[in-house]
Amino acid sequence: MAKLAVPEAIAVLVGTIVGAGVFTLPYIAVNSGFIITIGWLIIVSFIIIFLHLSFGEVVLRTKGDFRLPGYVGHYLNPPAKKFVLLTTFLTFAFSLLIYLLLGSQFLGVIIDFFFPDNVFPAGLLVVFLWVCLSLVVLTDGNKLSKINFYLSFLLLFLFFAIIIFALPHFKTENLNFFNFKNQWGWLIPYGAIFYALNGMVAVPEAAKILEKRGADKKKLKQVIAIGTIIPALCYLGFMIAVVGVSGESTTLEAIQGLKGVLGNSIILLGAGLGFLAVVTSYLIFASYIKNSFINDFEWSSFISHLLVIAGPLLVYFLRLENLIRLISFTGGMLGGFEGIMILSVLKKAKEHSDLEPPYQVPLNTVVMAILITAFIVGALCQTFLVY
């Protein structure tokens, strides 16, 4: 059992990270410039790995089953915990809405492939997907990690398959290395990539898997590093393949733009890839939020389940349908505030913690000041400048 702990924990992290955000990256790379997007991918990857490791240290320093709001309440103060409750609710509502919107699009492509003469309204597909995923959320939470474990490997296989099919049609001239049409366009990739790589919700789940399987907790550092690098490399390969094939014809969800070159079969494969990515991320994220409401805020199981299940559907009826805006705001603004909270909690945990962690992240005043400033500036830019 201990031997499977590391790959299972990595699969949970990879399966959570690789989600809806990845499919907007080729479109963003075309409109912001390929080199600029790659540069942001490298920078944000290092930032996210640092934050994941920081959160992992907090988890290993603390007794009890918490999520980020619980750690904030444990180490900081009640006002900080209330602020995290607000950002947690907004993050979960926007994220699950993004998953539902993209998931319904991919589901529509799959249905259209097998039943081309039938037209299903987009709203109906959103509600249908919401019902199905809500039923899974109501099941035993332990089953979610097992479902995600197997789906993650299939997800990676599909990623490599679509890249292999696309590369023979690759054309260098399709890569728009720089794009200065929008003076603030070079900032757009930051929020979207931050959102696409953020797997903070899976760090406690990965630590729990190692503990349950009797594995050395020190391996959490290895799990976080590998589990974050794999998605970053997949994103890089996916962007190169999609943009190199479809160029200026790259669509928002990346897949439909490949149809003219690769045909219907690859569209079905890509839709399957997208659907699996959305479903795995939705389930793990919903489980995280549900457990946070129960354990961190001490709400009843009924209320917690009700909020997690009803939240994204209620937000959907507000007609927030601009995916790039939603993803950039969630990554830049809400993800930035989440990063600030993690650094603040880690600083306090290093001073007063319950346990001695098997690894430690270097955190001094200079590093903390630079990162917090970057998060604040990034949040403001993603909210007010890039649109």
Image: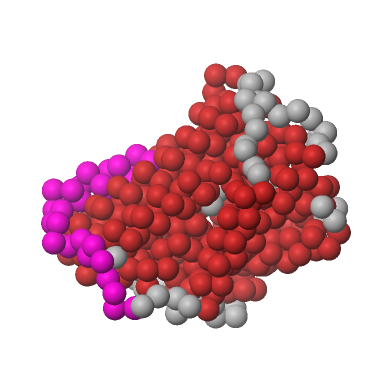
Residue 78 x/y as whole percent: 86, 59
Residue occupying the point 55% across, 67% down? 377
Residue at x 18%, y 48% (from the top left corner): 167
Q: Main secondary structure of the magenta part?
A: helix
* Residue 336, position as x, y percentages in the image: 59, 61
Please say whether residue 339 is one of the residues in the magenta stretch: no
What's the residue at 46%, 48% (across, down)? 45
Q: Which residue occupies the foreground of this view, 161 or 333?
A: 333
Q: Is residue 81 above or below residue 165?
A: below
Residue at position x 27%, y 71% from top? Answer: 179
- Please give left or right for residue 182 compared with residue 225 in the image: left
| Residue 234, x across and y down, in percent | 36, 45
Instruction: Look at the image and give the residue range highlighted in magenta.
Output: 156-182
Place residue 355 in its image quadrant. Answer: top right
Is 249 in front, or is 345?
345
Quadrant where the C terminus lies?
bottom left
Q: Quadrant of residue 347?
A: top right
**On screen, residue 295 above or below 172:** above
